Image (tube, grey):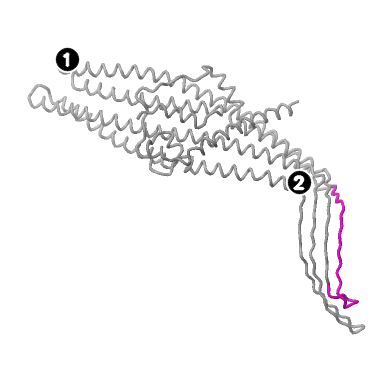
Amino acid sequence: MRNSLSTLALAVAAALLATHVATNTALAQAPAAAPAPVAQRNDLLAIYRLALANDPVFASARFARDATQERVPQARARLLPNVNAGLGYNETSFDSKTPDFSRSFNSWGPSIQANVPLYRPQSWNTFDQAKLQAQTADAQFAQAQQDLVLRVSQAYFDVLAAQDDVTAIEASKKAVSEQLAQARREFEVGTKTIVDTHEAQARFDQIFAQEQVARGTLIVRQNALRSIIGREPGPLVPLAEKPALAPPQPLDVETWARQAEENSFSVVAARYATEIARLSTKLARNGHMPTLDLVASLSQNRGNGSVNTTTSNTTRNATVGLQLNVPIYSGGLTQSQVRESLALEDRTQQDLEAARRTANQSAKQAYTGVDFGLAQVRALESAEVSARSQLESTRLGYQVGVRINLDVLNATTQLFATQRDLKKARYDFLVNGLRLESSVASLDERDIQALNTLLGR
């Protein structure tokens, strides 16, 4: 009963995996002949398609899958007839002292041998293992596709966040610079003290130092994206000013967690691993089983003589028979291999349970990031409105003399920091949404296309 349920689960997982891989392959190959959008709009979708073509990590995963799939025909070959042809040549010299006699002659001829497996249980076990290994490679490749989506999206928004940081610092520096110039003018005419000038100068120097760090961070983030797509990323299309952000559906973290435990590619791969280990145990036990082959050979030998005659002759030999091989004693090797396989089978069961728990945790973590991330975005949107009103009020208070220059500087910095934090919160929300889709094995290029519609012009 347990094996039947396990087989059914594997069949369902294989169907879902085949659909996912086919969809991703079609989506990835469709735009390959039309690279024009990359030149026209350097957006997330264009960057992702560049990564599909140029990312070495993804290419390595694809070649690893292709290599593993070759194990199926290799294992099938052990179940098919094996035919070999040969050609032999022999030269013989004969010398005899009693009586005094010597002669030399040669012979040559072709031969062909065929071996047809009739009963080899271990070969069938190896063939079943190879098919499961190919399905495991498909699951690992599908996970690599999802990882590429996440890596590209994360790198893309990291660059945007670094650009936003530089922009916010530049705007803050400009505002502080204007405030510094105003403080100097007012000090020169005697309406303000030198304290305001020193405060503005200190704030300006601080922002200048922050700007250097932000520019360095931007270069690092751009290099990270370049390592994925294989070229300079160039100017990226930013997120729209007010993107429409929607909560995850369904709004139930346990539903997402259950789907992750069943559909996550890491869980699927671990499930295949348990079946492979079970077949390994069966393979080891079948080491006691006999094997039966049909053996046939055909040879022809042509010679120009022999020890007894100098007459040329041609002989043909054809044989057909059965070859039975019965293992009797191997020094305890088979029993040891069975014990090893049983231990590895237990290990894969534990790995499967660990994969399920990890998938559950990842889904809940991503859901929490999306849920609380959306709440953070809404809070920062309100905070931006408040910070803007505070800056306007502080500027007015400074002009009438009820606020000091430091208040204006603080309000300016607070506004730009809030705007920067708001954009970063939106980026994090979108990336966590992709991670949530990835946790249930439903992330593909269509999610990138949907995300791309949230970008500005």
Give the class, few, some or many, for how many residues have Cα within 10 Å of label 1's Cα (few <14, many ≥20): few
Segment colored magenta: 303-326
**Which disc number belongs to residue 377?**
none
Using the rendered view, name the quadrant where residue 182 is placed.
top left
Residue occupied by mark 1: 402
Residue 323 included in the magenta stretch of the image? yes
> Answer yes or no: do the residues labelled 1 and 2 have beta carbons within 8 Å?
no
- Name the element at disc 1: loop
Give the class, few, some or many, for how many residues have Cα within 10 Å of label 2's Cα (few <14, many ≥20): some
Residues 32 and 207: in front is 32
Q: Position of residue 140 (x, y in %)?
A: 58, 37
Task: Point out the image quarter for the C terminus.
Answer: top left
Q: Position of residue 226 (x, y in %)?
A: 41, 41
Residue occupied by mark 2: 79
Outermost residue to the right: 99
Q: Position of residue 326 (x, y in %)?
A: 85, 47
Q: Nearer the viewer, mark 1 or mark 2?
A: 2
